[in-house]
Each structure stands twice: as C-alpha cells, then as structure tokens.
Image: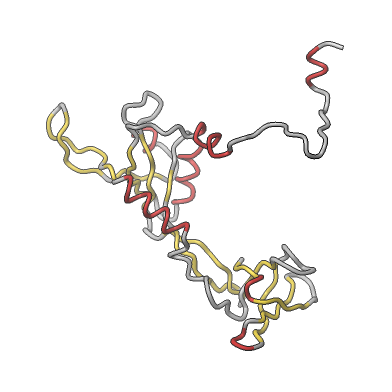
Amino acid sequence: MDGAAMSNRPVTYQIGEVVEFVDLIEEKRSEFPISPTSRWYCVVTNPNCQARAALGLHEIGYRTFYPKVRRWVTHARVKQAKDKPLFGRYIFVEVDPESEDQSFYAVRAVNGVESILSSWQETKFGMRVEPAPFSSDWVLNMRLRQMAGEWDETKGAIPIGAKIKLMEGEFADQLAIVTAKEGRREKTIVFKLVGENRYGSLHVDNVRAA
C-alpha cells in the first residue's frame, strides 16, 4: 500500500494517549497576524450595516470590533435578548498602513462601509486629510468592558415572558419562555418549553437569556 493511501486511512487513538497540543490562540493570531505598525481606525457604515461590514472586513483579513449593548426586546409578546451596536453606525477596524496586503482603499470597498473617520494630519507630503488612528489602549479597554458585560442590560432579573436557555436539568440546552417566578425573592423560574406543551422550573442561576 502506498503512502498516499495510508495517509487517507482513519487513525484510532487510545484513551489517555497524548496526540498533539494545539494552541487555538496562536492559530487565531496566524489568521490575523499582529503587526507593530497596525493601528485601529473608525469606520462609518451604512445604516444598520455594522454586522455586514464587519463580516466583509473579516473575510478579507481585517480584525474588527464594535461594542454592543444587550437589551430585552419584545416581539409577539415574547421578550428576547438582542445585541445592538453601542455607537450606532461606527465600528473599529485594525489596519497596517505599511503592509502591502492591507489598504484603506480595500476597507472602503467593503459592502456596508461608507467612509473612514479622518482628520488633517502632518505627512511627508505636507498637511493632508488622512484616516485618524485611535488609541490601541482605548480600544482594548472597550473590548474588556464588553467582555465584562458592562452593557448587558439582560443581566440580573429575568422578566416574565422572556425567552431563555435552560442550562441544567432534564431540559438542558432547550429554549423556553418564562411563565412565572416563585419562591423567596423570586429565585425559581417557571417556564414552558418553546413549541411544546411541557412545563418545568429551575433556579434563576441555571437559566440564561436567549
């Protein structure tokens, strides 16, 4: 049997056998290599196009970030947790102006991008209007605040009618609607499974906004 055929055969490993350590963080960094000359810039998107612009920039190799506020939104009498941009039409994109593989022209050409915030700056050609860089520390601070849930308004009390995900019990990982709250300080959530005529209850710590 030749080597090519053997390479296509499935490999069986024994429980406890050490195969390989894969650093997922390093793999992610290889997808978006960090350069010392990269800076963060603010992109203005078309109305309601933050997600589309961020996806388009990601597809051509640019890192993006835009902080989101998470709120309860009522639709058809059901409250759902929804993410909305904190800054309206603005998202941040990391660009390396000295890289041959990145350019502001490519950023502007992405579907959903309207413009890049710019200002008068001193260049080797004199004063010109150029994309204005943002402090990397400021962007990092905003990302940490996002991860800490600073703008998550669904944390805390879960209202009746809220759509939730069950994290424990016989219905774990299923979606449900809160129908009542019971017990001391309303710590017990009574729910009805989505699409089913089945009910149950869990401690509030064992459900999440969905």
The quadrant holding residue 102 is: top left
Q: Residue at x 46, y 45 (%)?
A: 54
Q: Residue at x 34, y 42 (%)?
A: 40
The quadrant in which the N terminus is found is: top right
Q: Nearer the viewer, residue 134 or 148?
A: 148
Which residue sits furthest right?
1
The quadrant in which the C terminus is found is: bottom right
Residue 148 in percent (x, y) is at 46, 60
Q: Nearer the viewer, residue 16 or 58?
A: 16
The quadrant holding residue 101 is: top left
Q: Residue at x 82, y 16 (%)?
A: 5
Q: Residue at x 62, y 78 (%)?
A: 161
Q: Nearer the viewer, residue 89 or 159?
A: 159
The quadrant holding residue 10 is: top right
Residue 95 in percent (x, y) is at 36, 36
Color scheme of the displayed model = secondary structure
Query: Relative to 85, is 164 on the left or the right?
Result: right
Say if 144 sits above or below 170 in the image.
above
